[in-house]
Image (cartoon, helix red, strand yellow):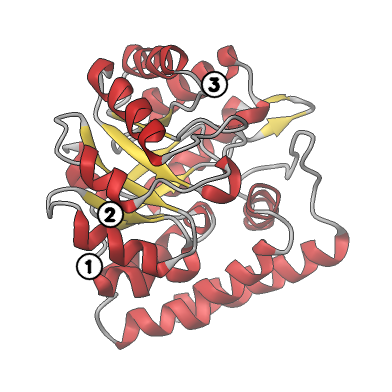
Amino acid sequence: MDVRDALRGITCPMVTPFDDGSIDESALVDLLEHLHDGGIDAVFPCGTTGEFPSLTADERQHVLETTVDNAAVPVVAGATATSIDETVAAVDRAAAAGADGVAIVTPYFTTANAPAGNRRFIEAVLDEASLPVLLYNIPQCTGQRIEPETVAAVADHERAIGIKDSSGDLAYVQSVLRKAPDEFLCLQGYDALLVPALRMGADGGINALSNVIPEVLGETFEHAGDERGRALQLDAIAPLFDACTTHDFAPATKTALAHRGIVPSDEVRPPLVAVDDAGTETIGDTVDEIVTAHAR
């Protein structure tokens, strides 16, 4: 399947399982099987939920190669760096591993002093990219958003295929949809806004909760335009999203996966910390309610 077609559905930004400080390759493979059984359309390793900043370059490559070797769906790899050359090198490593596409962010720590700076950065990466590129708008982590005008300016580049927006700003999605060409994919990365964004015209979702309840996210996508989709958004996605937001998505998602028995451990790396006992109980109870209700 072409990566563009796969992204017109639900993509899972995968967690990176750990075992006593090391990557748990067996758990990673089990997670991929769980996602395949749940009907996920594509996977996204080494992203925010995958704790990419806490992985070494060699570890990222190991996660990516393991994912490519075991995935039954297209793979979009996180290729984030703060310089053009390092970003292009990350794209090349993803291509060498067999990924189908990459996601890039704009530089963080030293951010652009004008929107033109981000446009120059993105265009320079696109000009050298060896794979299709998805822009990743997550201003709460990068310090600034990719302005809709910048998105529109680069959207016609042959390597640019779309944008993942995790800002939580539905007005931003609306602006991108208005300004970018129709073939440029707009993907909702903020789970609480999945159905609203899809009803507005977004093409798909890249959602952390799809690690835990891929079957629910898939059905929500299929029924986004009707009452079933609305009910799943309000009764399944919203309560788990609220429970996870309190504890950060990587730790909370791992807690939920461990509760379902998909991965053996909820271990995370500093500076993240595991969910406390009260949070673990709340997340586990919420997952049980969702899974039970969905099985009826």
Image position, residue 146 (x, y; %)? 40, 45
Task: Report the Cα–Cα distance between label 3 and label 2.
Answer: 26 Å
Give yes or no for contact between labels 3 and 2 (Cβ–Cβ under 8 Å): no
Task: Name the quadrant containing residue 259.
Answer: bottom right
Q: Which class describes the residues within 10 Å of circle 1: few (<14), some (14-19), or many (20+)?
A: some
Neighbours of disc 2 within 10 Å: few (<14), some (14-19), many (20+): many
- Which three-letter amino acid code belongs to the residue tagged 3? Arg
Residue drawn at x 45%, y 35% as measured from the top left: 105
- Residue farthest toward the right in the current orientation of the protein: 277
- Of circles 3 and 2, the one toward us is 2
**Residue at position x 36%, y 73% in the image:** 195
Q: Is residue 16 above or below residue 206?
A: above
Whole-number angstrom distance, CA of label 1 to CA of label 2 = 8 Å
Q: Which mark is residue 226?
A: none
Q: Secondary structure at mark 2?
A: strand
**Residue 252: horizontal and vertical position, in percent?**
68, 55
Residue holding disc 1: 201
Give amino acid for label 2: Cys
Report x, y in % for residue 180: 19, 52
Residue that mark 3 sits on: 60
Residue 186 is labelled as: 2
